[in-house]
Amino acid sequence: MPYAGVRSTGSGFDDNALFASVVMPHIDAAYRLARWLTGSRTDAEDVVQDGSLRAFRAIRGFAGNNARAWVLSIVRNTAYAWLRKNRAGVIVTVEDLEAVEAAQPNLGQPDAATPEAVLIAKTDTERLRAAIAALPMPFREMLVLRDIEGLSYREIAAVSEVPIGTVMSRLARARCRLIATIGRENT
């Protein structure tokens, strides 16, 4: 069954057109996810290229549901395969849920009108990027998919192949760690 807007040719689907309509609109999101998971621009490019090839090979199997989740799922799996092949294993620790409940975010809006405010905002952005990059992979992945890519909990569960409860728990723990890290830097 062809995806909306893609015509079937006499010999079957037009794979190039299907790929262009399903995968290409989400290639920037795929790159951002790969960048956060690998921590490197060039590694992310390799992951997205390999993921795109995998998506092209599997394009006829796309069911037409959620293209973004399908593409990000392929890129996520490709990134983890790449990391297993090219990097040593990392032990992931999980904090207590009570610490998550005790944490309260303190968000503020910088005044961008002054040069000092622009410098402070740039510094804060770099600290936030570093804090996100320091998170264990499962937490970083959830945070990027939800807060940067804007996926719903259900979409994240589909992409990461974990239950929605796990998505919510990991996301809460990731946010708690970010708050704690940034809070320590501010004292």
Image (cartoon, rainbow, N blue to C red):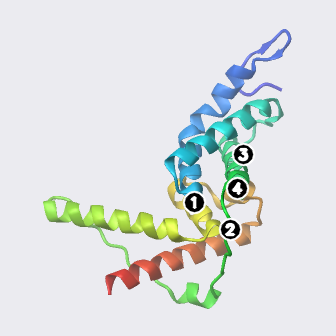
Badge 1 local density, few (<14 within 10 Å), some, or many (20+)? Answer: some
Q: Which residue is mark 2?
A: 167
Is 147 left or right of 91, judged from the image as shown?
left
Give the label on residue 74, or none.
Answer: 3
Helix, strand or loop at disc 3?
helix
**Marked residue nearer the N-terminal end (4 or 2):** 4
Tell me, for residue 80, which label it has, or none: 4
**Of callouts 1 and 4, which one flags the residue occurring earlier in the amino acid sequence?**
4
Q: Name the residue that disc number 1 marks.
A: 146
Foreground disc of the pair 3, 4 = 4
Q: Earlier in the sequence, mark 3 or mark 4?
A: 3
Marks 3 and 1, how far apart at CA: 17 Å
- The image position of residue 75, as x and y in percent, is 67, 46
Q: Is residue 76 above or below residue 127?
A: above
Q: Nearer the viewer, residue 100 or 187?
A: 187
Q: Quadrant of the N terminus?
A: top right
Quarter of the rendering containing residue 165? bottom right
